[in-house]
């Protein structure tokens, strides 16, 4: 049976994030955005206190033990305030913690997942490199075995929380012959700590969106990683990287849905305040059209991520549905943000109103975790029979409540 009713836990979660965001983030976000400042203590402490940093991680591993709908709701509420908040959910919870939950050894869960879920350590995900984004097989980072350790060398770029995170899930080639053949069975996944010798990071200084967030690069210069930090088995790195994206994309989809709602609410408010030709601009049919489109995009995006969250709760494969939700919601958020600026006229072109920030922030999500084009190709390939999802060795644990 289909049931769209949120339970009491969900409603309380939404309410707590709204109150925290309104009191602790909204008053400062414009200034932090302008100053390109990631307000680490305020944001991470607040999110940890709300239990968000381990939201869908079972309590036995330090998390809040909530379901995947809760993860989507949190992402939607956080991005309603600012995209930088939702990015933390995407990389720390989606890409990293949930991957360790599904693929990590018990020892890795105790050493890394527990402190991460408790919010004591922050985690990130390193796949992209200066020469490889969509084409993940083109990465150059290598991990060469030396005794009971692996020596990692390479550079990862455009990494969310690169200057903030303590632990990184890093994808690297462990089989150099397979690297030459671009055979993904030669890729492996490692947990790398910032404190490991040879690790260094820095910011992407010229970034023009998500300015209150942290995005950077890190370099691995002969970084020695113990063998027990390989996630999954040797050669499972590509599968793990793709599995992680199934979780990250879910938060990006639900987050973009929150951004559409923020655009809609700001536009409705402004359309009731601003007058032209003797009437509120909301009276003009062409303005109504933009607002109606925002509502249509919001409701559709929400249904798509809710379906995906339901599939996750049921323990069913959802790569196809999550990809569709991510593609639709991010493209729709770009449309909503562009129109929100338009409705605000010249005022939308100023930081005095939030819609300019929404517009700068929305674009990243149309690029990361699978570009718009990659998602289009994926959806077409499913239909054409060029792509099917094979079962993976490890799956996200279901949450049936
Ligand atoms: C704000 C931000 C945060 C990010 N955070 C992270 C992170 O935490 N961790 C991480 O690993 N990465 C992160 N990324 C990187 C992101 O995942 C990549 O930018 C993305 O995968 C695209 O890769 P690219 O930038 O190299 O573009 P490219 O792959 O070079 O693509 C360039 C263009 O060509 C198009 N294109 C490429 N291949 C095809 C094809 N086969 N068919 C049609 N069109 C194609 C693309 O759609 C795009 O329009 C982040 C990026 C941004 C902007």
Image (spheres, rainbow, N blue to C red):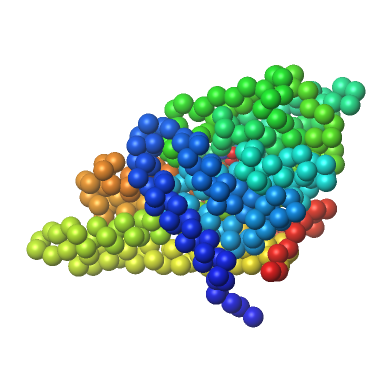
Relative to 139, is 75 above or below? below
Q: Quadrant of ligand 1?
A: top right
The image quadrant that residue 34 belongs to is top left
User: Residue 261: horizontal and vertical position, in percent?
Assistant: 40, 59
Q: Is residue 16 left or right of residue 52?
A: left
Residue sitting nearer the eye, 375 or 155: 155
Q: x and y percent of residue 377 in the render?
A: 60, 52
Count of numbered circles in the view:
0
Question: Which residue extends farthest right?
Answer: 147
In which quarter of the view is residue 151 placed?
A: top right
Residue at 27 percent of width and 60 percent of height: 269
Q: Residue at x 73, y 40 (%)?
A: 112
Q: Position of residue 113 (x, y in %)?
A: 72, 44
Whether residue 341 is situated above or below residue 301 in the rendered picture: above
- The answer to which quarter of the image holds residue 116 is top right
Q: Position of residue 157 (x, y in %)?
A: 59, 30
The quadrant of the rendering that contains the C terminus is bottom right
Q: Which residue occupies 69% across, 42% down?
A: 115
* Residue located at (64% from left, 60% from top): 66
Position of 57 relative to 39 (above/below): below
- Relative placement, left or right, of 365 versus 190 is left
* Quadrant in which the N terminus is drawn: bottom right
Say whether residue 209 is visible.
yes
Residue 182 vs residue 124, the one in the foreground: 124
Relative to the observer, which residue lies in front, 294 or 228? 228
Q: Residue furthest front?
A: 49
**Residue 96 seen anywhere in this rendered image of the structure:** no
Please give left or right for residue 275 compared with residue 263 in the image.
left
């Amino acid at each position: 049976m289909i049931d769209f009713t949120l339970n009491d836990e969900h409603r309380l979660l939404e309410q707590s994030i709204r109150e925290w965001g309104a009191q602790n983030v909204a008053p400062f976000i414009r200034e932090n955005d302008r100053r390109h400042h990631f307000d680490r203590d305020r944001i991470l402490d607040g999110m940890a206190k709300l239990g968000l940093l381990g939201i869908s991680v079972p309590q036995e591993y330090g998390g809040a033990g909530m379901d995947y709908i809760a993860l989507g709701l949190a992402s939607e509420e956080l991005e309603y305030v600012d995209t930088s908040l939702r990015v933390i959910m995407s990389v720390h919870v989606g890409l990293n913690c949930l991957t360790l939950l599904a693929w990590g050894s018990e020892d890795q869960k105790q050493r890394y997942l527990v402190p991460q879920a408790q919010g004591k350590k922050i985690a990130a995900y390193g796949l992209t490199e200066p020469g490889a984004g969509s084409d993940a097989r083109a990465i150059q980072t290598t991990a060469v075995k030396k005794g009971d350790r692996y020596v990692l060398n390479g550079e990862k770029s455009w990494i969310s929380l690169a200057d903030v995170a303590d632990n990184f899930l890093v994808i690297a080639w462990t089989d150099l012959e397979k690297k030459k053949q671009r055979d993904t069975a030669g890729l492996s996944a490692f947990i790398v700590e910032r404190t490991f010798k040879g690790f260094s990071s820095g910011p992407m200084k010229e970034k023009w969106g998500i300015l209150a967030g942290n995005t950077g690069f890190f370099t691995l210069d002969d970084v020695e990683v113990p063998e027990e930090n390989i996630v999954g088995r040797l050669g499972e790195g590509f599968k793990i990287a793709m599995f992680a994206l199934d979780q990250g994309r879910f938060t990006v989809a639900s987050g973009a849905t929150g951004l559409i709602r923020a655009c809609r609410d700001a536009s409705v408010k402004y359309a009731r305040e601003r007058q032209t030709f003797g009437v509120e601009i909301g009276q003009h049919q062409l303005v109504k059209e933009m607002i109606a489109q925002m509502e249509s995009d919001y409701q559709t995006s929400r249904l798509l991520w809710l379906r995906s969250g339901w599939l996750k709760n049921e323990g069913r494969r959802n790569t196809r549905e999550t990809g569709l939700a991510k593609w639709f919601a991010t493209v729709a958020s770009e449309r909503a943000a562009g129109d929100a600026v338009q409705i605000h006229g010249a005022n939308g072109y100023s930081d005095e109103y939030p819609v300019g920030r929404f517009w700068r922030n929305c674009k990243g999500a149309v690029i990361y975790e699978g570009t718009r084009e990659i998602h289009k190709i994926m959806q077409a390939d499913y239909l054409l029979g060029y792509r099917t999802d094979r079962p993976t060795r490890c799956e996200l644990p279901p949450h049936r409540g």
